Image (tube, coloured by chain):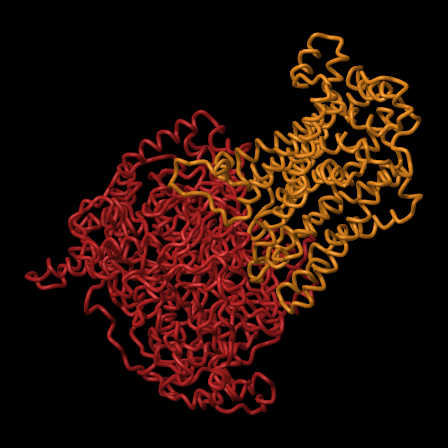
Amino acid sequence: MNQTGKQYWRSLEQLSNTPQFSEWLHREFPESAAVLDSSSRRTMLKLMAASFGLAGLTACSRPVEKILPAAKGSEEYTPGKPVFYSTVMPLNGAATGLIVETHEGRPTKIEGNPEHSSSGGACSAFAQASILDLYDPDRARFVTHETRQSSWDEFFAFAKPHFDPTQMGAGEGLRFLSQTVNSPSLDAVREHVLRRYPKARWVEYEPVSRDEELAGSELAFGRRLQAHYRFDRADVVVSLDADFLGLDSPEVRYSRDFSRRRRVASEKDSMNRLYIAESQYSVTGAMADHRFRMRAAEVPDFAADLARELGVLPPALTVLNANSRGKRAAAVARDLKRSRERSIVIAGPRQPAEVHALAHLMNYALGNVGRTVVYTESPFVPQLTALKELAEEMAAGKISTLVILGGNPVYDAPADLEFGAAMKKVAVTIHLSVSQNETSALAKWHLPEAHYLEAWGDARALDGTASIQQPMIRPLYGGKTAAEVLAALTGYKDQRAYDIVRNYWMAKWPARDAESMWRRCLHDGVIPGTQYPLVEPKPGKAPELRPSEAPAGLELAFYPSASVWDGRFANNGWLQETPEPMTKLTWDNAALVSPATAREFGLATGDLINIEVQGRQVPMPVWIQPGHADGAISVALGYGRTRCGRVGDNVGHNAYRIRTTANFHFGSASIQKTGRKYRLASAQEHFAMEGRAPVREATLEEYRKEPHFAAEHKGEAFSIFGDFDYSKGYQWGMVIDLNACIGCNACTVACQAENNIPIVGKDQVARGREMHWIRLDRYYTGPEDDPQAVTQPMNCQQCERAPCESVCPVGATSHSPEGLNDMAYNRCVGTRYCANNCPFKVRRFNFLNYHKGLTETEKMAFNPDVTVRMRGVMEKCTYCVQRIEEKRIQAKLEGRRPIRDGEITPACAQTCPAEAIVFGNINDPNSRVAKLKKLNRNYTLLDELNLKPRTSYLAKLRNPNPELA
Amino acid sequence: MADLAITRELDAPLVVGEPSYSDVTESVSRIVENKMPRAWYIAFGVTATLTGVLLAMLAYLVTTGIGVWGNNQPVGWAFEITDFVFWIGIGHAGTLISAILLLLRQRWRTSINRFAEAMTLFAVACAAIFPAVHVGRPWRAYWLFPVPNEYLGIWQNFRSPLMWDVFAVSTYATVSALFWYTGLIPDLATLRNRAKTKARRIIFGILSLGWRGSARHWRHYEMAYLLLAGLSTPLVLSVHTIVSFDFAVSLIPGWHSTIFPPYFVAGAIFSGFAMVVTLMVIARQVFHLEHLVTMKHLENMNKVMLGTGLIVGFAYLTEFFIAWYSGNPYERFTFINRALGPYWWAFWIMVSCNVLVPQLFWFKRIRTSIPAMFVISILVNVGMWFERFVIIVVSLSRDFLPSSWGHFRPTYVDILTLTGSFGLFLTLFLLFVRFLPMISMSEVKSTLPRPAAARGGER
């Protein structure tokens, strides 16, 4: 980065260059608390100026255009009452429908939109956490021109003549680069732009790619189709390296559909069966009934075996079935054949096109197409080759103007494209993004983009359902959307984002109904009739598949991160601190290797190694992952950012530096030990159950034989303190279905957002002080090399005979008449005795002032219904008592009616994509929770302690194939 | 004294060299009346510095938060409560010597009781720091006392052992102070009478509460002293019993145990006597009190250590036996984890120092060797500190759900706070030997053989 600009910029640069971990850590300590204040008087004045500026911005800057609240809100605005709006969050070309809670004009909480097909009322950890990105104090606040502060006026004064067709001509040297666009109104603007500059080209690029999927459907059907899977209809699912419950599905819908088939009410019920062949242990792998661990390069062989067994490929000449892979494939194939028309074979996005094609053909052969697998035209285009061409053109000096709309190609483009170097050869580079990143640093112009929660737009879900992206707040830093910028540059008929979107849709509807349609679409969050029509594909010939070659060295595979995705969420503290579902790592990525591979290379967790791919090297700490394929390394993308802000800078290591177009998904690599150690912060240190069975598990067969396997036989014990009378009124309780929970982390982040839970930073996590009120306990069972994994969400169990209550000397925690274990935060003196005496260790203590140094913008994200706890105070899950009280007041106002079942939903339950968490009144025999508690799989933890927890669990079941057992 | 009439049946003299009353007065009083030896100033310099370190660490703690220590989830209590229990334990020797041995007519206590009582007070003062600052919001620590408060109208929770602790420790501190002070009155009067400056006369005059040594005074004094001894006696048992309830009443494996009260009391006496021996060995050497604090005293204390050490060792065995015998998997795991888990070294330090080393006291030669008893007494206190560490930290670090297991690593603040608390203790002690008679003159005189006593009158 050129540092010779004006002073203002240089100071910000200095600020953002501060190593981010040490800042999070040291902020808590007085000797370094001066970091922000002492750098210079000028910084101080700037911060003051910024604060004054924000003070104006923060005050209820609702959008000027008319936006409509959803059904839950009231049209007349009542101070103190939240208002809910529907909107959509675009991610990787797929939109998630959301309902956003706002308080006094500030969005504070995100939920899934039940009307929206992609979410069905749930949403992912990414969507939950995106609220924090809105208030990120490191967002771009002004237009930057060659590292100098500029303004939109200056930009347009330069750009409007520059983009004038008399200047630009037909656009030979003009290129647009964006992330995957799946927005109808932006498409309209794009068409206009490309008509205006017929020789210009528009390239899309996402580092988490769909290219192989597209190519696979082309191979199988001769055209680009998008497959949609109906997991709720499938009895048998075979996943070929597809983490469809986790990171390989941009929508939460698959989790929801899949878990519906894991809901077992009694021993007479059936459930689906999941096979997975994969290298890295994914959350889908943890859910699987059979997990075949193999290198990613071996998955095509497995797919071919399966295809042969199913008659999609001609039988092999050699007897492949002799090996164990072949035997497994044969058993799986027989199972699939038994479940004709009710099965799914799904290939993962990292697998080559041939595997996708085989999966399509197998589905076709099994009669699944049209039943469990349906197809629509794909809205997507191949990206990687287009990006490669673009980079080559740029490097060759053929490009004069490059407009980058969102994204961060300098950081995340394949390393061999040398995108950063190529960008320097382009005369005019314009980068629009929400915050300054590695790409902005090399762009001539950087334009602040409006966050999706503050800008008008629209987006389609994977199935085509379009929704209006409705802003809740005016752009905090004067950002504009991509459509607005393009419209301004090219003289589109509408200029404001609102007009661009509204006029696009109004034109589609008959003029008479248009206004009411618009209002309805804003209210519902979906535009009816916009789903893509289904198509009937014609299968072609099966592709040629060469058997995989023995790998040269280790196999290296790249995965999106469960925390920072492709790196775009790197400055989001909630996500950085969310433990990775399998390793429980926070604030880092690591080179995951199997125990056997670690032994072979003499590696231990925390060793720093160099991973080398064709002369490119990157250091990476080792994490030994039980169940990982041998001879393979998995690395999460998205870490090692250098320019994203005070949270994300220099967190983890940048795997993009060894990701090229040749090994875009996986390839071979070598490693060298450096002899150094690296400190990794895992939120869980021990992964074995030690024979204690906090998670109780049986196979479906065992369950049928022994339906009460989960329950402990115990006599009723009494409490020496005497019990409360729990027979009257509302008695709140919770049931968590371990058979449905996929361990995706959405509940953890939702709880963090709802309950103002602080971020503590890597150092504090390493010391064992993370604050999450609901955590996902990960246990492995079976052999270390190939274990099964289970997840157990663990929040306060609300014991009726709570051991924490009797030991608090000041009475700060005590029982409510409704069975809640309440915390009076302002009475707590912080003896920590309650936490010691909690057998579930769900109480969280503010060891330091974790809210110290929050900027005014960050404070806007707080939920005003929940106390922000100070240091020295104990805190914990309260079943979202603020939500309970809100509904109680509402019920009282509505004529003292009883609270209906399902009316109150804690944040974790509301966002759970698997609907694994159910909350309600256990005194009402007709409530869902009371019914679930009667199931024979229901059990409570640590019965022998006589605690009577209000949270109970439904035991985990697996449905293994008897042939493979 | 109350037991003057009792026939002496002790086999060895409690003072050697047949000193007269005035010899006793002289040898004790001159310590506080003359300039201290150089060693005292050096020692005071060191301990005062350590006290400063303690204050600095506490200031850092209060301004920043508990996070400056290594405590975490699941180890909510670590060094601070270990230190608290350790110091409270140290105090026990004083109460035991003053009260129980008085009631049991153990006359050998007279030479060491003042010393031990002072130690009790200072140890309790050190101990009291920890519960006060270990809370997350120390400025609200007064909420632990049943005072009406402005917030929320929530009363204290009398089911909490921490609440019982507050009463136990504050009662203990009060009664110990009264007991100590009451015992001091005749000696303070002696110092007043000997005072050469006006300031000393006034100060000791006020402190001695108008003591003139009349028969009536003696009568009241002895009655009061006896009553206070009666009051203190249950405290010897109750304080550490209640401290042990902090653990025994909870449900954490390794804490939840009915053996804790006697086990803790024995351990407390064990460590208290060890501390008395450590300090007494130095003091009698430096201040030339060998004739008043004789080998018999030291040997008796070593015997008490041997006895209580055996009780402690027996308690360790019982815990392991019960863990196995109960069949409770959590309990079993906890004890295996103690001996073989990540903190095995702490457990084995505890066993060697508390069980193995004191066995040397079976030998009279070691029991009566000053260097040996000095080293052993220090080792015993190291072991007793680790005993509390093992009970508190190791039990918490691995409880019921393996997902929550964690590891505690102390920070420098933890270590310096512990070190600093020794500084405070020793500073108070040095001030005590500088300004107050460290041996109870009046009581020692009562143990003098008649003929010797008759040679000089009491002053």
Image hue for chain B: orange
Q: Nearer the viewer, residue A736 or A754?
A: A736
Image hue for chain A: red
Position of the C terminus of chain B, as image quadrant, is top right
Q: From the viewer's perspective, is residue A25 above or below residue A640?
A: above
Q: Residue at x 67, y 64 (%)?
A: B323
Q: Quadrant of residue A524?
A: bottom left
**Left or right, A943 with reference to B149:** right
Residue A394, visible in the rendered structure:
no
Q: From the viewer's perspective, is residue A935 above or below residue A33?
A: below
Q: From the viewer's perspective, is residue A259 above or below residue B216?
A: below
Q: Residue at x 41, y 54 (%)?
A: A815
Position of the N terminus of chain B, as image quadrant, is top right
**Tally of numbered discs:** 0
Q: Position of residue A637 (x, y in %)?
A: 49, 58
Residue B175, visible in the rendered structure:
yes
Q: Nearer the viewer, residue B199 or A27?
A: B199
Q: Position of residue A690 (x, y in %)?
A: 61, 68
Q: Position of residue A239 (x, y in %)?
A: 46, 76
Q: Residue at x 58, y 70 (%)?
A: A627
Q: Nearer the viewer, residue A353 or A644?
A: A644
Q: Residue at x 47, y 74 (%)?
A: A956
**Left or right, A553 with reference to A360:** right
Q: Quadrant of residue B184?
A: top right
**Left or right, A748 with reference to A767:** left
Residue most extreme to the left: A512
Q: Position of residue A200 (x, y in %)?
A: 30, 56
